[in-house]
């Protein structure tokens, strides 16, 4: 029996039961042991989340150049955000030193929380910087649509 990954959304309870019963029946007919693992579905970050992040990072870069003559890239700012606890850190297994986690490793929920912390950080430490909120992009990125 091949490994299968099935994703069930809330509200599909009957579908879930039917598929599970069919899978177990098939496995028993083949006289094979099976292992069933149930875990929360974690969708990776969305394109709109990534687009909003880079829109905001570019805004922050331009703001810091204009107001403080501080020249840093968006990647540099991701490092700063990690150092300040806004972007999660992980320990590098080779060097045993902390480093920022790649945003590609965040699921949509974690990315939304990161964007919320980033927005709060900018509002607290750079209140003159008004991050843009393009309706279509912002609502999609924050899961509000």
Image (cartoon, grey):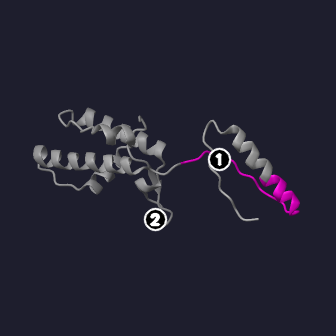
In the drawing, does residue 115 fall left or right of residue 27? left
Measured as percent of width and height from the top left, residue 38 is found at 69, 47
Q: Which residue in the protein does label 1 denote?
A: 39
Select label 1 or label 2 by which is in front.
1
Q: CA distance from mark 1 to mark 2?
A: 31 Å
Indicate the quadrant containing the C terminus: top left, top right, bottom left or bottom right: top left
Is 131 left, or right, of 140 in this rendering? left
Q: Residues within 10 Å of mark 1 (few under 14, many from 20)?
A: few
Mark 2 crowd level (few <14, some 14–19, many ≥20, 10 Å Cα): few
The picture places residue 132, in percent across and down from the top left corner, at 24, 39
Closer to the camera, 47 or 110? 47
Residues in magenta, as a range: 23-42
* N-term mark: 1 or 2: 1
- Residue 100 x/y as whole percent: 40, 54
Relative to the observer, which residue lies in front, 139 or 73? Answer: 139
Q: Is residue 75 left or right of residue 25?
A: left
Q: Quick check: 64 left or right of 15?
A: left
Q: Which residue is the site of mark 2? A: 95
What is the magenta segment's predominant secondary structure? loop
């Amino acid at each position: 029996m091949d490994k299968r990954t099935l994703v069930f959304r809330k509200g599909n309870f009957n579908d879930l039961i039917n598929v599970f019963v069919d899978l177990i029946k098939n496995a028993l007919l083949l006289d094979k042991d099976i292992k069933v693992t149930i875990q929360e579905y974690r969708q990776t970050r969305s394109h709109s989340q990534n687009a909003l992040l880079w829109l905001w990072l570019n805004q922050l870069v331009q703001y810091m150049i204009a107001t403080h003559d501080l020249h840093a890239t968006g990647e540099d700012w991701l490092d700063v955000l990690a150092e300040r606890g806004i972007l999660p850190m992980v320990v590098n297994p080779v060097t045993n030193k902390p480093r920022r986690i790649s945003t590609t490793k965040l699921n949509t929920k974690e990315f939304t929380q990161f964007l919320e912390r980033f927005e709060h950080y900018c509002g607290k430490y750079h209140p003159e910087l008004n991050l843009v909120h393009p309706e279509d992009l912002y609502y999609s990125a924050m899961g509000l649509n």
